[in-house]
Image (spheres, coloured by chain):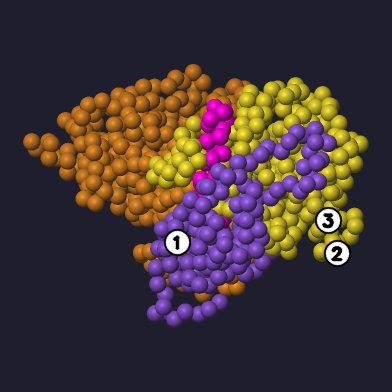
Chain colours: A purple, B yellow, C orange
């Protein structure tokens, strides 16, 4: 992890995250560590430490946080969220961090594949041809069609398409 | 009772056996599954991670479809449930965001009005249909089949939003026991299966799933019952992947994984068809003989 | 105007207020819901940081209340109505029947020895049993037995063996109306029930207990005779964990105690030292978020706890506690502050320090008095800065923990009790002169 001298620490990043949707929790974290103690990934991966991530946000280690793998290894299981006593809610804050990371062109491959599929087909994962044929066999009827055009209109309005083209 | 049936993406793509069992038991329980025309992906966590407004707008679009039908939504997948429920809650509570989303939805001639509720299959069975009616339809109860119930993360978390559903895990246990099976306690029942990391970091996903499977194995059960298709995938196929990658013994785990809808279906006297049995990567023949 | 005061609540704050007022010539009615005065302090083993025996400091004051000519003890009683205004309140009190004649009973206890029926002992936090006819605790004031009708099987044995013929099974509830000039509320606190936080296993895991339960175990007059043994198998625990802030500093809606309860860090360190004095080879760890050791010799006490007694202070709030089914030992999961990785340690006993909350029933009392409660159910001061002991109703005052976690410890409760007595004496004296 990159070391920053005291003079380069600032609360700007903390406030940037606080002003991002789902990121308000950074303002109330008391660093109690209950989140890390509860996290299923922390039990498997030593470096995955939600409390530490929150600490880094608060202290202003912007690039370490945004370029790191940790936010993308979060399961969004919300175990931490239910146990956080102060609404620090690192589980929610992870979304804010990931949104910022994506805006800066940082998006892992697996996520990109789903996002692209969503834009192209209106679904994050689509049935294979075989699966579609089998539907008839199994008496499930036709797969409900997605209104792809509407989906694309929406995603263009939110600039989703631009976001994912940055990352690919 | 009519519901706007939200299938999501994963079930039609990978788990038609889940859909099949639901469609078979629904009419017997008085559940009318109305198709949601043109409904799109709920926008699960992977998409929420990309962009906030995209999520809210896409989720809202589905909520609008249900509103137009004048019905509440019933989901099967926990992730869909969480996405739609959270979006519904946020948009109802926060005027400003609601207005912003409606600006986007105006482009597709829709308007979110906050007139629909989002329910999961467990909610519908437990609250709307009622345990009594479910028990009435059980004609071939499992005689004390020992089940490890995997409720999945988003059946009850975040509790803040699910506040009324805090007893969600208990509701699912009661439903399982209504089939004559016994829900067995095990360590960290509320923990995640690891599913969300499939395709992103399979190694971590497998290790998380392994923790779950070890705990379930230690409790000594006959099978696992899931409600979420991610949990099903991670625990069913996951068992084989873990065995292969971590070089475990062939006899390891061998825990059949059933969708709750399948368990209930069999208890209602309807046998699974061959293709549905084969759809389980970990063989379930042991359970069928019970 | 009545030169009399009703004090509602017979804990240390209420007792102090009563004594101060009585010694100034006021008639004091000390109304207490339980069958004995004493409150929480009577349940404690030792107080911090001086490590005084709690009941040893408290009992003389309790006895003074019993003997003081100006104090009338109305125990096993509740306030049911209040009318009037400052100087002229009419307080309706309902005295619950003890089924024992207070004037005859001398507390010899022969009845209890013969009583065949048992019930959980509330004073011992339901850890031990008492008889259906019982003395609330050995130092109870008044020293009178009481029959709990719910567990009484009406065998009549107590009546037969009582040498003083004090059993009165026909006793009826008694309504009294008190004419007083002022009212002081001192209802104290309850402990939040930590089973609402399922991850800590209270209520499910046998060896997870609350701090008050620990006090009763450590106390010589408690269910184990002061022997430090654990609930599941009676073994002496060789390693013990304290977990701070269980419900305190918690903003989650279903818990809603965002405040710091102010005394838990202190009593946890005290209990840890007590345990080490009992059993020096026991490993004791305190898991905390912040260690709030403010005021009167406390930081020094903490330093001694670390250096002299080897108590481990771990800055990490555990996520969950699980159980080893074969040993009933607890496994505490926490982030090790040194290595920043998730660890789990096995403990024989876990002590939870729960949030301190208003006593059950204060909403009803507040309604009767017409006094406001804050959003957590604590009594609201008229002005928390300038008039902390007054309520908005002239003539009604409050002191001690019922006002909320501003109260630090026993000396603070005593101070506030005296302060309230002073306020009441002043207000009533002024009225008398006018």
Residue C375 rendering spot, x and y as whole percentages: 37, 41
Lower sequence index among marks 3 and 2 = 3
Residue C380 within the magenta-colored segment of the rendering? no
The image shows residue B12, relative to residue C152, as above or below, that is below
Region rendered in magenta:
B49-72
Q: Quadrant of the C terminus of chain A?
A: bottom right
For the residue pair C251 and C394, the one nearer the viewer reads as C251
Q: Quick check: can you spot residue B121?
A: yes
Q: Quadrant of residue C112?
A: top right
Position of C413 relative to A98 (above/below): above
To which chain does the residue with label 3 belong? B
Closer to the camera in the image, B18 or B54: B54
Tell me the residue at 21%/45% (across/down).
C423
Q: Nearer the viewer, residue C156 or A139?
A: A139
Q: Chain of mark 2?
A: B
Choose between B185 and B112: the one closer to the eye.
B112
Residue A17: image tag: 1
Q: Dot 2: what SS?
A: loop
Element under disc 1 = helix
The N terminus of chain A sits in image quarter: bottom right
- The dominant secondary structure in magenta is helix
The residues bearing labels 3 and 1 have C-alpha atoms spaced at a distance of: 40 Å
Q: Is residue C107 above or below residue C100?
A: below
Query: Which residue does the image show at 46% across and 45% down from the upper left?
Result: B104
What residue did someone put label 2 on?
B247
Q: Are marks 3 and 2 in contact (CB under 8 Å)?
A: no
Residue placed under numbered mark 3 in the picture: B240
Please state if A132 lies on the left or on the right of C386 as rendered. right
């Amino acid at each position: 992890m990159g070391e920053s001298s005291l003079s380069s620490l600032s609360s700007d990043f903390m406030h940037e995250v606080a002003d991002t949707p789902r990121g308000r929790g950074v303002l109330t974290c008391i660093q109690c560590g209950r989140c890390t103690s509860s996290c299923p990934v922390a039990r498997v991966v030593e470096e995955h430490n939600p409390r530490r991530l929150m600490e880094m946000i608060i202290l202003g280690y912007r690039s370490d946080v945004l370029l790191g793998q940790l936010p993308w290894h979060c399961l969004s299981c919300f175990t931490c969220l239910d146990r956080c006593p102060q609404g620090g809610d690192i589980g929610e804050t992870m979304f804010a961090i990931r949104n910022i990371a994506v805006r800066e062109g940082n998006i892992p491959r697996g996520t990109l594949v789903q996002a692209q599929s969503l834009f192209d087909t209106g679904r994050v994962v689509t049935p294979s041809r075989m699966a579609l044929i089998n539907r008839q066999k199994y008496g499930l009827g036709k797969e409900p069609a997605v209104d792809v055009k509407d989906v694309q209109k929406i995603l263009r309005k939110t600039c989703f398409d631009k976001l994912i083209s940055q990352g690919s | 009772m009519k519901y706007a049936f939200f299938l999501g993406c994963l079930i039609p793509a990978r788990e038609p056996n889940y859909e099949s069992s639901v469609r078979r038991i629904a009419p017997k329980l008085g559940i009318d599954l109305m198709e949601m025309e043109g409904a799109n992906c709920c926008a699960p966590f992977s998409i929420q991670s990309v962009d906030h407004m995209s999520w809210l707008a896409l989720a809202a679009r589905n909520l609008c479809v249900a509103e137009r039908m004048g019905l509440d939504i019933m989901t099967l997948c926990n992730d869909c449930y969480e996405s739609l429920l959270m979006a519904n809650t946020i948009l109802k509570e926060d005027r400003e965001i609601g207005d912003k989303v409606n600006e986007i939805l105006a482009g597709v001639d829709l308007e979110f009005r906050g007139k629909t509720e989002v329910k999961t299959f467990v909610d519908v069975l437990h609250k709307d249909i009622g345990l009594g009616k479910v028990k009435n339809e059980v004609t071939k109860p499992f005689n004390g089949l020992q089940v490890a119930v995997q409720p999945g993360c988003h059946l009850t978390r975040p509790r803040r939003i699910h506040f009324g559903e805090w007893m969600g895990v208990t509701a699912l246990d009661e439903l399982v026991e209504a089939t004559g099976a016994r829900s067995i306690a095990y360590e960290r029942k509320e923990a995640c299966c690891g599913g969300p990391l499939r395709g992103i970091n399979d190694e971590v996903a497998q290790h998380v799933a392994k923790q779950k499977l070890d705990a379930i194995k230690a409790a000594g059960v006959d099978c696992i019952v899931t409600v979420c298709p991610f949990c099903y995938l991670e625990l069913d196929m996951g068992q084989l992947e873990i065995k292969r990658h971590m070089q475990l013994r062939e006899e390891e785990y061998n825990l059949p994984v059933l969708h709750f809808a399948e368990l209930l279906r069999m208890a209602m006297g309807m046998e699974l068809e061959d293709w549905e049995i084969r759809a389980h990567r970990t063989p379930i023949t042991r359970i069928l003989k019970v | 105007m009545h030169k009399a005061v009703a004090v509602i609540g017979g804990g240390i704050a209420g007792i102090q207020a009563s004594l101060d007022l009585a010694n100034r010539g006021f008639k004091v009615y000390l109304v207490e819901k339980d069958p004995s005065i004493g409150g929480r302090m009577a349940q404690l083993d030792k107080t911090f940081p001086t490590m005084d025996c709690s009941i040893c400091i408290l009992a003389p004051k309790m006895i003074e209340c019993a003997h003081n000519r100006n104090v009338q003890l109305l125990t096993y009683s509740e306030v049911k109505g209040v009318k009037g205004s400052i100087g002229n309140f009419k307080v309706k009190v309902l005295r619950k029947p003890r089924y024992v004649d207070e004037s005859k009973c001398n507390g010899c206890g022969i009845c209890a020895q013969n009583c065949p029926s048992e019930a959980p002992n509330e004073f011992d936090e339901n850890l031990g049993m008492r008889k259906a006819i019982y003395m609330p605790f050995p130092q109870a004031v008044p020293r009178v037995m009481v029959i709990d009708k719910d567990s009484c099987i009406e065998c009549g044995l107590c009546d037969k063996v009582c040498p003083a013929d004090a059993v009165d099974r026909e006793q009826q509830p008694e309504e009294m109306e008190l004419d007083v000039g002022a009212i002081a509320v001192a209802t104290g606190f309850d402990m939040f029930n930590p089973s609402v936080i399922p991850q800590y296993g209270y209520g499910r895991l046998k060896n997870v207990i609350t701090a008050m339960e620990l006090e009763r175990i450590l106390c010589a007059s408690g269910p184990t005779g002061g022997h430090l043994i654990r609930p599941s198998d009676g073994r002496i625990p060789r390693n013990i964990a304290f977990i701070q802030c269980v419900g305190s500093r918690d903003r989650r809606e279903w818990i809603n105690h965002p405040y710091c309860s102010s005394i838990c860090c202190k009593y946890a360190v005290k209990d840890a030292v007590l345990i080490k004095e009992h059993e020096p080879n026991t490993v004791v760890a305190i898991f905390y978020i912040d260690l709030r050791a403010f005021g009167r010799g406390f930081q020094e006490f903490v330093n001694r706890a670390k250096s002299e007694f080897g108590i481990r202070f771990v800055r990490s709030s555990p996520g969950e506690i699980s159980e080893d089914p074969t040993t009933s030992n607890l496994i505490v999961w926490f982030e090790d502050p040194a290595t920043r990785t998730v660890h789990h340690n096995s403990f024989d006993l876990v002590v939870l320090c729960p949030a301190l909350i208003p006593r059950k029933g204060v909403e009803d009392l507040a309604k009767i008095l017409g006094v406001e409660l804050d959003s957590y159910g604590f009594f609201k001061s008229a002005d928390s800065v300038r008039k902390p002991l007054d309520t908005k109703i002239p003539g009604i005052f409050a002191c001690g923990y019922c006002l909320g976690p501003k109260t630090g410890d026993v000396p603070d409760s005593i101070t506030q009790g005296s302060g309230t007595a002073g306020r009441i004496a002043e207000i009533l004296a002024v009225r008398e002169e006018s």
